Amino acid sequence: MEHTYLRYECADSFGLVTAAASSKAPPSNSILAFLGSARNAPLMTTAGSYCVGINLKTCQPVLKVGHREQLSGGLGTGRALNSDEVVCLDVTAVADEAHTSKIATGWVDGAVRIFDIYDDERDRRRGMAHSLLQDNTDDEFAQREPLVLNGHGQSPVRSIVFDRGNVSRLASGGSDGSVVLWDTVAEIGLFRLIGHRGAITDLDFVSLVGLDGLITTSLDGLVKVWDLQGQCCTQTIATHRGEVWGSALMQLSLEADEPLRWRLITGGSDGQARVWSVQSPRRGTGDSASMTHDESKLAMTGNHDDVCSFMGALVPPQNVSTSAERICCIHFHPLGKYVGVLHSSSKNIDVYLIRNRQDSSKKRQRRLRRRHEKEKRKTNDGTSKSGQKRGILDDPNSSSDEQGDGALLESSIMDPELMKASDEFEYVTTVHASQKVRGFAFLRNKEKGELARVVCVLSSNALETHMLERKKGR
């Protein structure tokens, strides 16, 4: 008597809106990206073995991006199709005749896979792209394979980012601490950056006068600035207390005639969001006439090769409760007007407004005026604000404003005349989600009467869109 055994193996999945990678890969901050800048552009999310595009207006999936895994040994091996999972993603647009959008994905197996999506395919809602499902009449569209780049071995790819100034360049960071720079046109790896001893958590390209750079953060507690032309590290920031879990870099220009400002925000396990001013290295530039007041003062002290200068920390008002957990996600608004900070295992996102240069200067002048008046009162009556006599060990330069910046160690060595984080960033509101938030992103467009809109990825396999409104009295 012959026996027949049937074995069923997973060929596809459904019902996933967003899902985290398995325990084989640590969580990533790059799990959301909009496929284009149009008002109805789908939101791409990581969903297990695929990336899913969601139309936020209709709340329906319109795109599914995956790949066909080549099984060794064929069916019956016990390995499900597409058993590898997406850890992170990033999206960029390519200026070509077909108006291609590229989706770069990092996977648990250490591979970087890049998918091409054309505008006509996306706009016609042709169904599932690069999927195992054969419900599409265009076989080329349904079966087109991605570009596969292997450079991290078996280490999961934790962070990935395109260079917005040169979309052919791509950087990926692995859980082993290595960073690989890729040329997606030539389909080769350019070089590897080795210097971190912990997993890479975030990558940010920066283009300055005299520096073609990359800023990396890692779980080893270090923030590094790399010179991509020299393939070397030019600055290492080791002031964080513990691991660095996320970062965000933005080129700010809120007014037409306002000089460009680069601001880097890093978040660590101590729960503080530190703000850094990013400017060109002063060695060899020789352009002192174009320096701002802050840059000229910084040029007289410190290392001339330093790119990042500490400005303070983002701290909400005392009447606003916030989480003390590590900061896991930081994102700027696409137009550079707001920045959001998310703590781990939290349902809340703290949102800050970014003042323009004129308003920031006024805020600094008021702070310096209050500081001067306080020091003058201390000199006249010899007493402090609390009425106690000043001792010989009291610091006459300390003030309540500086003590409220959060990072006391760094604030104590800052020049009070320099621009501080409290001068440029103002707390606006807190977004309260219904479940724990895994990640978020700001929407470029908004409705009339709104400050902005933010979409949250929840731990319950759901998306929520929130409208931001300024609280009364603020």
Image (cartoon, helix red, strand yellow):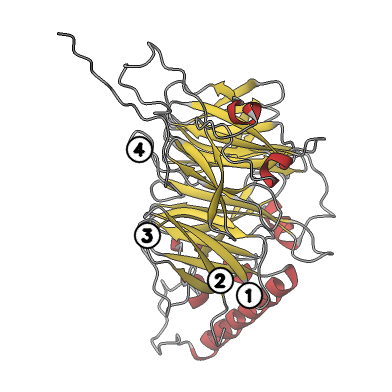
The residue sitting at 50% across, 91% down in the picture is: 381
The residue sitting at 69% across, 46% down in the picture is: 123
Q: Amino acid at mark 1?
A: Glu
The residue carrying mark 2 is 467
The residue carrying mark 1 is 450
User: Can residue 231 be seen here?
Assistant: no
Q: Amino acid at mark 2?
A: Met
Q: Label 2 near label 1: C-beta < 8 Å?
A: yes
Closer to us: 398 or 462: 462
Disc with the residue nearer the chain's start (3 vs 4): 4
Q: Amino acid at mark 4?
A: Ser
Q: CA distance from mark 4 to mark 2?
A: 32 Å
Disc with the residue nearer the chain's start (1 vs 2): 1
Disc with the residue nearer the chain's start (2 vs 3): 3
Disc with the residue nearer the chain's start (1 vs 3): 3
User: Can residue 388 be seen here?
Assistant: yes
Q: Which mark is residue 22?
A: 4
Closer to us: 108 or 234: 108
Q: Report crowding for label 4: few under 14, some 14 to 19, many 20 or more residues within 10 A (C-alpha).
A: some
The residue carrying mark 3 is 436
Task: Indicate left or right for 269 with 296 as reference.
Answer: left
